[in-house]
Image (spheres, rainbow, N blue to C red):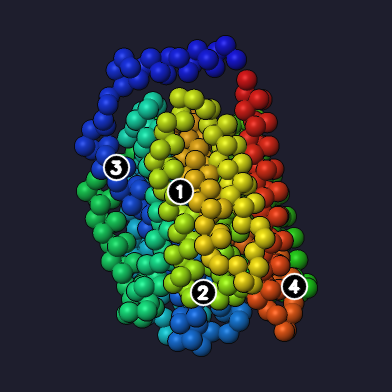
Amino acid sequence: MASRQALAVSTASADRAGEPAAPGARARSVLLTACFGTFLVLLSYTVTTTTLAPTAATLHAGAAEQTWILTATSVGLTALLLIMGGVADDHGRRRVFGAGALVLALGSVLAATAPDGTVFVIARVLQGAASAAVLAPSLGLISEAFPPGPARVRALGSWGASVGLGIAVGPVYAALLADHAGWRAVYWLLAALSLLLLALAARCLDESRSPHPRRLDTYGALTLATAVALLNIGLAQGRSGWDHPSVWLLLALGLLGLAGFALVESRVAEPMLDLALFRTPGFIAAGAGALFTGLSLVGLMSCVPLVLERALHTSALTASLVLALWSGPSVLAALQARRLATRLAPATQLAAGLLACAAGEAALYGIRADTPWLRLAPGLLIAGIGSGILNAGLARLAVSSVPAHRAAMGSGVNNTARYLGSSLGIAISLALITSVHSPTHPAAATATGANRAIVVAVVMCVLGAAVALWARRAEE
């Protein structure tokens, strides 16, 4: 405890004694580019939530294809996040980031011109893979540009804000543009923004990589990508019904694949993921915090527009604007979370954010078919503040819990856990929301199911906070 207090004092002293008040122009450019890339990834990730109906109608997509339209990006994203983080650390973060921006543009063009649902789903998987290449190096680029200290804490807060901003803007942007110019315009503009990101990467980023590069862990990459893809496919199939044997077969194969990945990593000379990191409480807290964020928060909030439309009979645009009452405050909270860095350890900040999210979600409980959407505003605002604190805390832990030269890998682990948790959380929330059936009162049935999903999400938030607090005590 004494050494930790001394470290806090020395950090504060360094801030007063000589930490630059403002980073250089080059560092600010790196931060802008990394944050814009993260924003664009979240924008791409969320646009289908409010454009599913017109997209499915144009492409004549059935129920199964509609499920894939919603989940295809997650498959590409989660399967490659950790791999892209390792490749970026070892072979160049700027190179991987730029390649991701280019492929994101190509995937967006393919989505905009898709003649049928199959091609569109392929395009969304490609966008997910490209998003992994953009997202994974982003924290590594920031940590390279900003040395440890208050400037890095502020930069990581800005990165956390860009996550919330993308979630806030994506559904509204897609709904507005689809209404006025058609859903294909959403992807044409994404392609243009991706090319802008590529230009920023070429101009603003310097190449950086680990001073101790490793060879590509081919077997580890193959087993991980296969395992995570199988899990995501199984969860996507489960949305159409959990009574199909193929769903449980896919999930079982995915879990076996993760076990195989762990076995490979324990035996190769230069593993993609050093399993010794799991002996570090901070690393466990970062991964568990990201996983529970996806399970408890992203999973539930991703289903809020569905509940608003089916139970409260709002339009898709209104639903996306109501959801912004959650995602909008998360941006401001993440930007202000730097003030917590001198008072709270990263794991404590993580626990505080999860508990605030639990309080906000609990305030949503009691939805009824005649509930006005304004009744949800206080809970969404509280959960949004908690989300901002949480995103900033996760960014701190993702960087600080791994060796400095493996920052992109740490980001890859953290984001893999977040998005895999999100896929599972959405599947759980949807299953609960649709678990009540009433042909005569469908809105009331949806509301009852939503309340069940809220209770489960609150419990998972509290469990995530408990893990974070355990890690904090274990580090003392």
Q: Give the foreground label among 1 and 2.
A: 2
Q: Amino acid at mark 3?
A: Val
Are there few (<14), some (14-19), or many (20+) residues within 10 Å of tag 3?
many
Q: Which mark is residue 370?
A: none
Q: Which mark is residue 436?
A: 4
- For image coordinates 48% across by 18% down, the residue present is 8
Q: Are marks 1 and 2 in contact (CB under 8 Å)?
A: no
Q: Earlier in the sequence, mark 1 or mark 4?
A: 1
Q: Give the foreground label among 2 and 3.
A: 2
Kindly report the distance in space between the C-alpha atoms of the residues bearing marks 2 and 3: 40 Å
Q: Amino acid at mark 1?
A: Ser
Q: Earlier in the sequence, mark 4 or mark 3?
A: 3
Q: Earlier in the sequence, mark 1 or mark 2?
A: 2
Q: Are marks 2 and 3 in contact (CB under 8 Å)?
A: no
Kindly report the distance in space between the C-alpha atoms of the residues bearing marks 2 and 4: 20 Å
Residue nearest the viewer, comparing 208 with 65:
65
Residue 11: image quadrant is top left
Kindly report the distance in space between the C-alpha atoms of the residues bearing marks 1 and 4: 32 Å
Kindly report the distance in space between the C-alpha atoms of the residues bearing marks 1 and 3: 22 Å
Tag 4, which secondary structure? loop
Q: Amino acid at mark 4?
A: Val
Tag 3, which secondary structure? helix
Residue nearest the viewer, comparing 331 with 97:
331
Q: Is residue 289 above or below residue 254?
A: above
**Pointer 1: what residue?**
330
Q: Earlier in the sequence, mark 2 or mark 3?
A: 3
Q: Which mark is residue 30?
A: 3
Quadrant (top left, top right, bottom left, bottom right) of the C terminus: top right
